[in-house]
Image (spheres, rainbow, N blue to C red):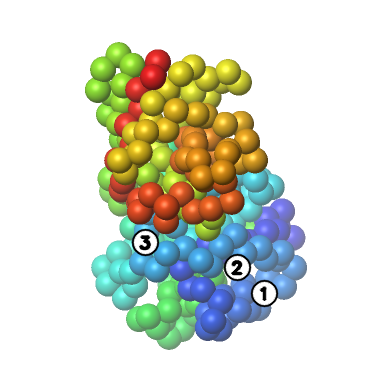
Amino acid sequence: MSDIRIVTFTTDFGLNDPFVGIMHGVVLNIHPETSLVDISHAVASYEVFDGAWTIAQAYRFFPPRTVHVVVVDPGVGGTRRPIIVETDDYVFVAPDNGVLSLVEMREPKFTVRHVTAERYFLQPVSQTFHGRDVFSPVAGWLSKGIAPAEFGPEISDYARLGLPTVERIGENSLRGVVLKVDKFGNLITNISEQEAPPLFTTAPPAVSILIAGQTITRVCHCYAEGGEDEFFAIVGSSGYLEIAARQASAAEKLAAGVGTPVGVVLGG
């Protein structure tokens, strides 16, 4: 009996159709003892980066040897490959479209295999639902103890996303972008402690943060510290600088979104 007991699912499928339940059934039909966990099925449709962000935030909070299935797959039925990725503690099953790029940035070990052993697929394989016919059965067999090496050869030419970087403009100035808008309308930037260490301390220095024509000068420790009708910055649970508004959507109020530039000047 395998020590791999948990399979998670991250997709852009939503919950209005039976797709998610079908994938669950495929895994359980192969290995009924598997525990299934849905991380999210609300990834923005076709948005590979949004899927990459979602799985990168969640995967490491699961027990070692969890199998993570990630299906954000606008290239389904095309030439993109199905892959298995092994890190030190986890196994991932996904399309080869860069959806695991942010996981790779966090992990010292990142071994990628092209899944070619079609005997582990459901047959016939649909051209439109590889989540059912490829990724879920592979995850089921992995959870049952089949070694990743049994599914196909190791590859090095796998897809990676081109990720936005933080640009340093001067000694105390930098420019980033909004990476993600969460359900509450908080604007999550790509600025982390690595780029602006002083902002991630318990007593951040004076700062000017420029976004969508507004200048923000306060870094709060929690959302409740924000004043009425005030925009403020906060270090979010993701480890990135966020722009927020108290009990309101900063994204809507600023008319800002993914890709909006964010300037930071330390010292005000």
Looking at marks 1 and 2 on the same chain, the residue that comes earlier in the sequence is marked by 1
Q: How much space separates mark 2 and mark 3, taking CA atoms?
A: 25 Å
Choose between 119 and 137: the one closer to the eye: 137
**For residue 228, side relative to residue 264 (left or right):** right
Mark 3: few, some, or many residues within 10 Å (few <14, many ≥20)?
A: some
Choose between 217 and 185: the one closer to the eye: 217
- Say which amino acid is labelled 2: Gly
**For residue 119, side relative to residue 141 (left or right):** left
Q: How much space separates mark 1 and mark 2, taking CA atoms?
A: 7 Å
In the displayed structure, 265 sits above or below 263; it is above
- What label sits on residue 47 in the rendered view? 3
Q: Position of residue 143 (x, y in %)?
A: 64, 61
Q: Which residue is mark 1?
A: 28
- Which circle, 1 or 3, is nearer the viewer? 3
Choose between 100 and 164: the one closer to the eye: 164
Q: From this viewpoint, is residue 148 visible?
A: no
Q: Position of residue 234 (x, y in %)?
A: 53, 35
Q: From this viewpoint, is residue 226 visible?
A: yes
